[in-house]
Amino acid sequence: MAKGTQAGPFVLFVMGLIFAGAGLALVYYFGQDIKLNCARSLNQCVIEKTSAFGDEEIEEFFKLSSLAGAQVIEKKDSEGDYTYEVLLITDQGRVPMSDFSSVDHNLHKMNAEKINNYVRSLEESLEIKQSGKLIRIIGFVFAGIGGLMLLGFLLGLLRFVIRLVRQFN
């Protein structure tokens, strides 16, 4: 056998682990749903994160009276592409609405406008949701590809074991 073919199953196993791990990490860390809830009668705003696995966590709690508005900031990544995120402007400083930015400028602009309109209005409540659904889909596709690679490795291993058993019988 050539040396390259001997490395095949090992490479398939390692690549499967990398793809599955990267996909699940993407889902866990970036596939969250973010929700901003503000209630004028309670004078409070809460930023909640819900993971793809249903874990809910209150990320930030602040008084509505400290909220001055929101703005969209633009970041340039190492490849020169732009990403955007919403920052809430409060008395304590700027609070990011989520832990990550995205390329959807229109969504962030629309959310910042909703927040700014709410601050200027007398509306009782505000609820804004940012879905991590697309990131979860991409993550699960990567995890699925990794799972198929691992399955291919296991099937190859099973064939190898069956051949060994047949040789000794």
Image (tube, rainbow, N blue to C red):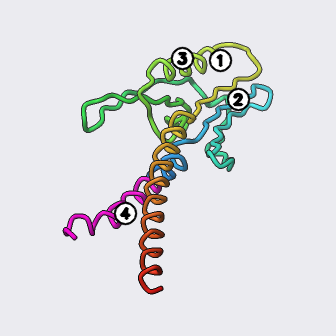
In this view, the residue farthest toward the left is 2
Query: Tags 1 and 3 in contact by the CB under 8 Å rule?
Result: no
Q: Looking at the image, which residue is at 44% across and 86% down?
A: 168
Mark 2 vs mark 1: which is more N-terminal? 2
How far is disc 1 from disc 3 in space, using C-alphas? Answer: 12 Å
Mark 4 vs mark 2: which is more N-terminal? 4
In this view, the residue farthest toward the front is 169
Between label 4 and label 2, give the one nearer the viewer: 4
Question: In this rendering, is residue 166 above or below 81?
Answer: below
**Residue 110: assigned label:** 3
Question: In this rendering, is residue 128 above or below 58?
Answer: above
- Which residue type does callout 3 highlight? Met
In this view, the residue farthest toward the bottom is 168
The stretch in magenta equals 1-21
**Residue 14: assigned label:** 4
Between label 2 and label 3, give the one nearer the viewer: 3
To which quarter of the image does residue 126 belong? top right
Between label 1 and label 4, give the one nearer the viewer: 4
